[in-house]
Structures are given as structure tokens and as C-alpha cells.
Amino acid sequence: MRQWTVLYKKELKEQWRSFKWLWVPLVFMLLGMMQPVTAFYLPEIMEQFGGLPEGAVFDIPLPGGGQVIAETLGQFSQIGTLILVLAFMGTIVNERVQGTWVMVLVKPVSYANFITAKWAGVATIVTVSYVLGLAAGIYYTVLLIESVPVGPVISGALIFLLWLLFLITLLLLFSSLFKSSAAVAFLTLGIAIVLSLISGVLPEFMEWSPGMLTSHSYEWLITGEPRDGLWLPVTVTAVLIACMISLSVYSVKRKEVISS
């Protein structure tokens, strides 16, 4: 356990040195506040720049608080995912290319500790950034629009967080398999987009898919209640995360043995 803790602290320090602890949370906070502010001022923006004829009345009702938070998560799902992939696509690739992982693994370091510490380090900054961004979205929603129900917000937010953890685990797996950061980013974004599209187009056939987590979280926020079939994608996603971490450990062990 002491070895894992040392590796975990090392990951957090490296993220601090690369300023990820500064700009990743900042981006999520900006995304979080953007949606409620845009929703509140949209009528004025359309009135000023919409090219409406003189005397025309442009009345857009304000969306509900839950809907605004759901749309905020939509921003996280699109722009936020891209930011996370760009920030962490070199998690293992860079160490392989620079040869620094050999310096760590020649010591009596467990491969499982090496991978899980990296996963936990990335998961920590992603979770903190997500929570801060969501908190900014909730604050401006309450300030400008209306209060939001605490229970559905927490529940929907946790379901969406599981989707983010699935994506960073997929990113870590590809980072252990390939030497190109571009390939890691392309494959991660590609699979995320495909899962989301197919889950949206064919939900009856993709009830098990991690791509269904986003729609489940949105609906819970908007309606205040979970949709039927929620626990199937939750369970499948948790199992896939565990499997991908195990595959990452195996991949690093195999490549390190071959290189030695």
C-alpha cells in the first residue's frame, strides 16, 4: 500500500508541474457557468443580434433548472471530453517514448500499482474538475434561473461521472497499447462518439452500453426520476472499467518484458 501511495503522489505532483491542476478545472468551471448564463441572456442576445423586424416581440421561456444542468452536462460530454483526451492522451505514451517508465519499473514496483496509481491520479483531477464545473453551473443556475432539486442533481451527476471514468480508463488502455498520442486520442474520441451515436439511435439494442449513461443522467436531472434499465449500463460500465485496467496492466507488463 505504501508503494501505491508513493506512486499516486508522484502522479499528482506531475500533473501539478504540467499545470493540469490549473487549466483543466478552469475549463470545466467556464463550461459550467456558460450554459446557465447563455440560457438566461439568450432572449436579449437574440433581440440585439437576431435581425428581427422592428416592433417584433421575441419571447423565449426560461428552461427549468434541471434542464439547464442537463445541458451543462452536455457541454461536459462534448467539449469537456475533448479537453480530457487532449490533457491525458500521453499518460503512459510519454513515459514509454522517453524511457522513464523503465526507471520506475526496474525497481520492485508492481505493474498493478503502476497502472492503478496512474488511473487514480487522472481520476482524481477529472473528478475534482467535474465537481467544480458542476458546482459553477449549479451556482449560476440558482442565481439566474431557479433552484434545482438536490437529490436528482447528485444522482444524475454521479451517473455522468461514471461515463467520464469509463472514458479515461479507455484512454489509459490505449495509452498502454500504442506509442502515438494521436492514435490514443483518435481511438478514444472515436469510440466515445460511436457509442453515443449508436446508443441514441438504437437505444432498445444498446440498453447495456456505457453510451446510455449520458441519456440516463440527463433524464434523471430533467424528470427528477431514474429511467428503467439504469443499472444494466452502470453494471456493464463498472465491469468494463475493471477489465480495461487489468488489460492495461497486462499490456505494460508484456511490453516491459519484451523491451528488457
Image (tube, grey):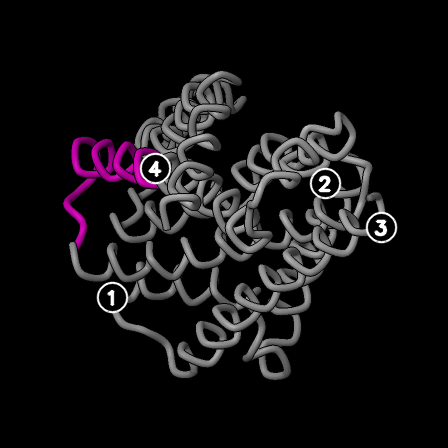
Q: What residue type is disc 2 on? A: Ala
Please report whichever mark, 2 or 4, sits nearer to the chain's N-terminal start. 4
Q: Which residue is mark 2?
A: 185
Numbered badge on residue 201: none
**Cα distance in 3D space between marks 4 and 3:** 37 Å
Mark 4 Cα-neighbour bin, 10 Å: few <14, some 14–19, many ≥20: some
Image: magenta residue range? 131-149
Asked whether disc 1 touches disc 2, contact meaning CB atoms under 8 Å apart, the reply is no
**Viewer can see residue 73:** yes
> For mark 4, what is the residue?
128
Q: What amino acid is found at the position of numbered circle 1 in the picture?
A: Gly
- Mark 1 or 3, closer to the camera: 3
Task: Say which amino acid is labelled 3.
Answer: Ile
Secondary element at image label 3: helix
Q: CA distance from mark 1 to mark 2?
A: 35 Å
**Mark toward the viewer: 1 or 4:** 4
Q: Secondary structure at mark 2?
A: helix
